[in-house]
Image (tube, rainbow, N blue to C red):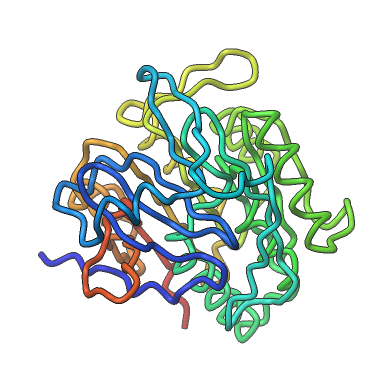
Amino acid sequence: MNFEVLEHPGLPGHALLDSGGGEKLERFGDWTLRRPDPQSLWQPRKGPQDWDAASLRFERESDRGGHWVAGPGERPPESWELPLDLPGLPRGCRVRIQPTPFKHVGLFPEQAANWLWVEQRRAALESAGAAAPRLLNLFAYTGVASIFAAKAGWQVTRVDASKTSLDWAAANARLSGLPDQAVRWLLEDAAKFAARELRRGNTYHGVLLDPPAYGRGPKGEKWHFGADIAPLLETCRQLLEPSTPSFLLLSAYAIDYSPLAFHNLLAGWGGQTQVAQLALPEAASPRLLPCGFVARWCQAHP
């Protein structure tokens, strides 16, 4: 069984400039960031002078995080806005880029391929007669997928256990010109919320999940991918609207599982299953940086 590498559509304002030696060098808007990446086992293409000129460099202090060090040039602001006008998606989406002590910056550019796929699924649902389809976004981080979906006409319910992520996502929505009521914002444990929705009899035309390997809910609920993903997926399957070409998208990074395991999770559902590798292309190079796996399932519909 072969698992393809999804073609990345490119993301205006972002570029992967180089990778290697356990790091990656990226541009976000006007600023270049140098930070760890465990997948980049090879040698960098660029020389030390290019890497050392980064606007910010992440220095790890422990397995719990680290701090950012300014480069030799002008110091970047604490945060800055980045427009995400991606062809094929609604215009006007903007996000706040802010380097955190956990090396993340509020945007995962490799997800652009998934944002476009969700828009394709919306078009398929519209053709099947599903007006204003309902989307459930679990483990939703800073809300980029939710914002694109809301702008495209989805009724979006966005769930995350982190208040910091919730506030960041709401701020991104305002930057993108969305009214407060455009997205249903929930600070919740994803598994508990999904189970309650099932008991209530609510359904969705699409479900997105991007869970971590480990995590905690707002009330201390424990999340472990290996133990908890299968029952959560089963709950989500039952939440999908049965009378339309509904879908589920599961993506994950930094977990010790094969793409075959992702395939096996969904293979018994019927419909259509696709498992693929997410990757970012390097600028002016054929090399791709692996960025996790994605499993996509679509319900067969006449």
Residue 112 in the image: x percent, y percent? 49, 66
Residue 189 in sight here? yes
In the picture, measured across the screen, residue 94 lies left or right of residue 139, that is: right
- Which residue is nearer to you in this view: 223 or 17? 17
Q: In this view, does 227 lie above or below 234?
A: above
Residue at 43 percent of width and 67 percent of height:
298
Q: Which of 149 and 270 is in front in this view?
A: 149
In the image as oriented, which residue stretches furthest toward the bottom?
127
Q: Where is residue 240 in the image (x, y as percent from the top left)?
A: 55, 56
Among the 4 quarters of the image, the one containing residue 163: top right
Q: Tell me, yes or no, if residue 201 can be seen here.
A: no
From the viewer's perspective, is residue 28 above or below residue 36? below
**Which residue is drawn at the image coordinates 44% and 66% (left, top)?**
15
Give residue 144's quadrant in the image.
Answer: bottom right
Please state if 104 lies on the left or on the right of 195 as rendered: left
The quadrant of the rendering that contains the N terminus is bottom left
Q: Please give the name of the residue rendered at 21% of the width and 62% of the height, measured from the top-left corner.
A: 45
Q: How far across and down, in percent of the image, does residue 4 sit?
A: 22, 69
Q: Residue 168's spot in the image, x, y percent?
A: 71, 41
Residue at the extreme top? 220
Query: Along the horizontal axis of the image, is 219 left or right of 287?
Result: right
Point 49% across, 43% down: residue: 71
